[in-house]
Image (cartoon, helix red, strand yellow):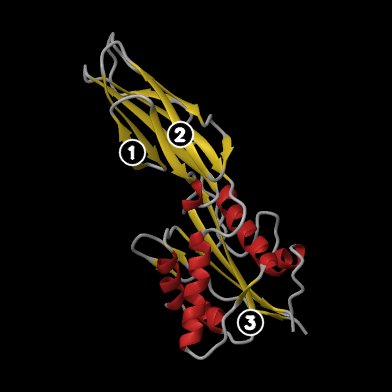
Amino acid sequence: MKKIIIKSLICALAYTTITSCTKQITDIPAAEDNTEKSSITAASPTVKFTFPKNEDTVFGTITIKIKATSDVAIDSVQCKIDGVWYGSKTTAPYNFNWNTTTVMNGAHLLQATVFDHAGNSKIKKIIVHVLNAGVLSFEQELLQLVNAERNNRGTASLIFNSKLFISARGHAQDMADNNIYGYTGSDGSAPWDRMEAAGYPWTAAAENISGQKTKAIDVFNAWMLNAGLRANMLDPSFQDAAVGCGYNYKATYQTYWVLDLGSTQ
């Protein structure tokens, strides 16, 4: 007989932990693909991305290329990723290397700002879609933290399962893309439905999720504080597991984490 385990959800906010969460959809402003002026003069500068372009899909390590012009000298060109300062250059070429495997798959916001010697500035924003195959370092880290805790308690480590990885990564990205939070997918699927669709023949299964936290250790610590989620991670009947993450800068929580656990015996 198959055992289905449904535990309470955890929704991690900046200062508040919520022990239950329902699917929710929040209207978010449309993606920015615009050019904004912070000041306008006859010497107004221009700035644009020559690579990548808006809505491009990228993977691996790329070179962000920005072109800026002004009627007067350019003081600097600044690059931000998801609203966080990434780098600044005072001379051309205004290129920035970006290892996309350091971020979650999903929609990310790039922003370029040019500042000229006359005190003018201009901003350009685009969206790029990061899509890296394989397990990312922070996904590995979270599973390692779970296994370390299991070992400390005399419980065998969970074995990474590629089929559970497909179901976990898929649900994480589904939550990010559709701005939902919960065990139910945008297509109405339950965790076990997604595991079966990925080809995992479970006899027992469970799922933990988290939103908004950006570090694996913070997700792990939050799950350890929740009795149901902690029990899932430490349950000796589970043999297989995988962690998947998804990201969308427009979504309510931006970062989404899923741990799928199961056994086939």
Report how many numbered discs are placed on residues in the image: 3
Q: Is residue 194 something that shows in the picture?
A: yes
Amino acid type, mark 2: Ile
Residue at 52%, 32% in the rendered image: 52
Q: Which residue is mark 1?
A: 87
In the figure, 74 relative to 265: above or below? Answer: above
Checking the image for residue 238, the label placed there is 3
CA gap, disc 1 and disc 2: 11 Å
> Residue 64 got which mark?
2
Q: Quadrant of residue 202?
A: bottom right
Mark 3, Cα crowd under 10 Å, few <14 / some 14-19 / many 20+, is many
Residue type at mark 3 is Phe
Residue 193 vs residue 164, the one in the foreground: 164
Within 10 Å of disc 2 (Cα), the crowding (few <14, some 14-19, many 20+) is some
**Residue 31 seen by the camera:** no
Of all residues, the one furthest to the bottom in this rendering is 154
Q: Residue at x 55, y 62 (%)?
A: 22
Viewer-nearest of labels 3 and 1?
A: 1
